[in-house]
Image: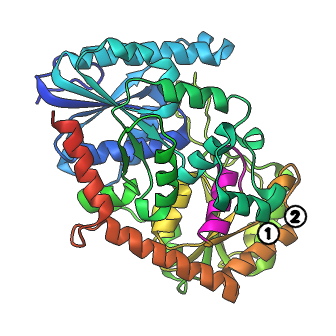
Amino acid sequence: MAINNSSGDNLQLNEVIVAMVPWPEHGHLNPLFLLSRFIASHNIPVHFLCLTARNHDLKKRLQGVRRNATDENLHFCDLSVPKTEAESDKDLFLENLGKSICEKCHLLSKNTKRLVIIHDCLMITYIRDLHSIPNIKCYSFHSISSFVRYSTFRQVLHIADEDQDKLIQELGDQFPTVESTFGPHLEEYIQEEREWKLNSGVVLNSFRELEGKYLDSLAIHAEDNTPVWCLGPFHMLLESSVDSCNRSVQHVSLEFLDKQDANSVIFVSFGTTTTLSQDQVNDLALGLEQSNYKFIWVVRDADDERLDTENNSEGKDGRVVLPEGFEKRVEGRGMVVRNWAPQLEILGHTSTGGFMSHCGWNSCMESISMGVPIASWPVHVDQPYNTVFITNVLKIGISVWKWTRREEIVPAAAIEKAVKTLMGTPEGEEMRQRAVELSNKIKNSVSHGHGGLARKEMESFISNITNN
């Protein structure tokens, strides 16, 4: 099969080609990247259409990973848009990015009987020209949880729900609002999504035993019978098929964990889009130090999310300043990791007993799948809703600080208390046991041997995109 790495030229005619169209920000890339690799493992050519800098980052992630031969079916299609446009107008930039995506899809469609396009739901506005391609099937990917989708849809569309009304009454002003998270344009987006005609199905990074109630509620209020596939956790499906987690060189954080007792270390990481202020870094350091618990702390600035960047956009090393003498005082008990850390492998290590997280959905899914309870510290968008789901619905975590006080510096005393509660109390142990039970359900759901539901859904999805 001759496939060009950067365009739709020189392709032999295929039964099916898949084009992945992510939203070009880091938190949205990884799930579709993992899904791309899994689909490619079924001997289906997959083209990942994204900005050059973002593709560069993804290619780096493959370095050192034990790759399967089917990774040869994964092709990075680098897209670029003039820098001046991004600087002056983000919408104009995205419109031009959408045009580039549609042009590439037109080229790909000429070399296959069917072009399957799996796009981030946020890209709908910018890829409307796809309707002129006769042999396409489009699937919309949602990077947020079904709990978040339902909670926000319910607020915008004024849907009655006795159970959630009770939860809101219980939490009072700690239950997030659309205005404090997604902002004023969500209603417009929801309407646009409901009017999108090129939708052959919806793909979610979740699993039914976790969010079935909210999936059912969304289905009741849907305007059509569009099929929904819960294919998550993507990393576990991928791991069982192409052995993605094995690296040729072990990261220093894993060597540290190998020397610790079971469930004795808390992992602290705020994802790729959060930069803490210097005052907040100081209080976080003090809280971890005063807790006297072992920790691994990923200290880094947020990745560069500027859409116009043509450079490596991952967080820069060494820009976060820690309190003087901190690393010396916690030596042997705490480890500071600057820049990238193997989060999934850290969470999966037996020595990891807790996770202090911003509660992005990708991180939540990874932590749940590994049976690790969460000390939640949400920052923006869907994260406050995820916090409610983790702490009040699943009951596998605690809140570090109140969402209504998000503009304040979280004091060291609150951080210390959260760590001690999660790591050293009966309450924390109960959360850990519930997290382990959920993890076991997920593993059975993904397993070949148990006829897992997630496995069956993935097989159903592969069948849907490959058959007429």
Q: Position of residue 385 (x, y in %)?
A: 66, 53
In the displayed structure, does residue 150 sit left or right of residue 418? left
Q: Position of residue 369 (x, y in %)?
A: 45, 67
**Residue type pointed to by label 1:** Ile
The reply to whether dot 1 and dot 2 touch (C-beta < 8 Å) is: yes
Q: Residues within 10 Å of mark 2 (few under 14, many from 20)?
A: some
In the displayed structure, does residue 310 sit left or right of residue 102? right
Q: Position of residue 83 (x, y in %)?
A: 58, 14
Q: Is residue 98 above or below residue 464?
A: above
Q: Which residue is mark 2?
A: 411
Which residue is found at the position 52% from the left and 42% from the top?
221
Instruction: Answer yes or no: is residue 121 visible.
Output: yes
The C terminus: image quadrant: top left
Q: Which mark is residue 65?
A: none
Which residue is found at the position 77% from the left and 39% from the top?
179
Q: Secondary structure at mark 1?
A: helix
Q: Secondary structure at mark 2?
A: loop
Which residue is found at the position 80% from the left and 55% from the top?
403
The N terminus: image quadrant: top left
**Residue type pointed to by label 2:** Pro
Which residue is found at the position 66% from the left and 59% from the top?
162
**Is residue 118 rendered magenta in the image?**
no
Range covered by the magenta-colored residues = 378-394
Q: Quarter of the image holding residue 187?
A: top right
Q: Nearer the viewer, residue 105 or 47?
A: 105
The colour mode here is rainbow
Q: Nearer the viewer, residue 19 or 331?
A: 19
**Is residue 383 rendered magenta in the image?**
yes
Q: Which residue is mark 1?
A: 415
Q: Residues within 10 Å of mark 1 (few under 14, many from 20)?
A: many
Q: How far apart are the alpha carbons under marks 1 and 2? A: 7 Å
Question: What kind of secondary structure does the magenta stretch mostly adopt?
Answer: helix
